[in-house]
Image (cartoon, grey):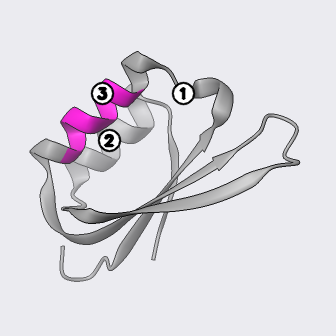
Amino acid sequence: DKLVSKITLQLPISMLSDTMIAELSAMVKNNTGNSLLYFQIFSDDSSTNIELFSRSTKINVNKQMIDNLTNNLNINFKIN
């Protein structure tokens, strides 16, 4: 957790749904920590790209969370 200063979740706008948002919210609540949480939302044709960050929520980036992002939610991410 001390080595990861920031994680950026990369999501196409078509992937956003109530279910996806609920799963991400639960994951964030269960992994509070010290790393900054950013979101990169982009359109399917890549013409629009917006980066957002959470001011109030920080996350603990661990193996379990990374596995959940890649295997269960199919979300790309960048760790900085």
Residue depicted at x 52% and y 60%: 52
* Distance in Å between CA atoms under marks 3 and 1: 11 Å
Q: Residue 64 got which mark? A: none
| Most common SS among magenta residues | helix
The 10 Å Cα crowd at callout 2, few under 14, some 14 to 19, many 20 or more, is: few
Q: Looking at the picture, how far across and down is residue 32, in whole percent? A: 12, 57
**Picture quarter containing residue 14?**
top right
- Classify 30 as above or below 54: above
Q: Residue 67 got which mark? A: 2
Residue depicted at x 74% and y 54%: 49
The residue beneath circle 3 is 23
Q: How many marks?
A: 3
The 10 Å Cα crowd at callout 3, few under 14, some 14 to 19, many 20 or more, is: some
**N-terminal-most mark, 3 or 1:** 1
Viewer-closest of 8 and 17 = 17
- Classify 54 as above or below 75: below
The magenta stretch is 21-28
